[in-house]
Amino acid sequence: MRRTISFIAVAAAMLIGSGCAKEIKTSDNDSAKRYFDAWISVHHPELEKSGLGIYIYDDIPGSGPAITDATYLYVTYTTTDLKGNVSGTNDIDVAKKIGKYDKTYCYDPSVWIQSTQYAGVKEMLKGMKIGGKRTAIIPSWLMNTAEYGSEEEYLSKTKPDDNASNAIYTIEVVDSTDHIYNKQIEKIEKYLQERFGEKTDSTYYGFYYKQRKAPTSDKKFPDDTTIYINYTGRLLNGQVFDTTIEDTAKKYNIYNSGKSYGPKSVKWAADSTALQLGGNGVIGGFSLTLWQMKAFESGTGVFHSGFGYSASGQGNIIPGYAPLAFDIEIVEKED
């Protein structure tokens, strides 16, 4: 009997004690952190955590000015997972090495808005200079754009579903600017000088037109006139991304057997913004180029990204913030 009473007393004491114990709170990211920390200890035990919790290695200092709070960065980058699988790159050498090189893609440095990058990427950019190259291992809870002051806050306030996977970034900062259009205009004027051998004045801020063949008439086209054109669109590195000319498409490796090549119809209008190519609207720089032209004229319009595809670009073919050049010739309709 005494043993029974004694056992009950001990059990009750244990229950009371457990009820008074403090509850241990765990973060949703605990398991992710345990995995990441274990991976670091196995693969890079020599590295020390920095900032919000990234691990920097292969850090090559740049010789240019510090990027500080520059709004726009021109970067060459490669991202991989922890197994080394490449998930994204604009480095032509890396693309060739992994067998993903595509002649139609643009491998120029990408333009990043510094303030919109992932927290871990912003952390690795701190202290970098133009020309610098850095590789950093970034945990998943820093692969989002939330702004907190410590690793603990990211771990406690972000959910695993909010985060991308752990990543390894290699970034080379090629240039920076606070004035993206001014930077593009510098490139445009250099392009025009190199291509045509003379200075070309802008028609509008950020838009330039160079006549290559004089028109057969000085009269503007009447509204609702249908004209026919051939055109070729290029990046300023010379890479062609679109054309109506079959031989040009083949030369620049963008030929598509399913596409119909030859002159396209343009419906003229009272305003440049209302011009239509094959029944569809066109980007501002294209319409402004046409707007300068008269019967059977040929010319080249070159313009900053505000007249083109702006920050979004067009997939891997036209990067965001890319200035463009269009060669346009007004021709006879083909039978």
Image: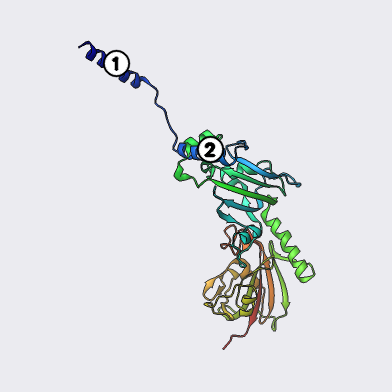
Question: In the displayed structure, does residue 272 sit left or right of residue 206?
Answer: left
Of 224 and 136, which appears nearest the observer? 136
Most extreme residue toward the top is 2
Question: In the displayed structure, does residue 73 sit left or right of residue 153?
Answer: right
Element at label 2: helix
Quadrant including the C terminus: bottom right
Q: Position of residue 167 (x, y in %)?
A: 55, 47
Residue placed under numbered mark 2 in the picture: 37
Question: In the displayed structure, does residue 74 sit left or right of residue 274?
Answer: right
The circle drawn on residue 39 is: none
Q: Position of residue 164 (x, y in %)?
A: 50, 47
Residue at image coords 52%, 33%? 152
Of 206 and 42, which appears nearest the observer? 42
Q: How was the colour assigned to the protein in this rendering?
A: rainbow
Q: Position of residue 136 (x, y in %)?
A: 61, 44
Quadrant including the N terminus: top left
Q: Position of residue 60 (x, y in %)?
A: 71, 45
Element at label 1: helix
Residue at image coords 74%, 67%? 192
Residue at image coords 72%, 80%? 214
Q: CA distance from mark 2 to mark 1?
A: 40 Å
Most extreme residue toward the right is 198
What count of labels does the image hold?
2
What's the amino acid at mark 2? Asp
Residue placed under numbered mark 1 in the picture: 10
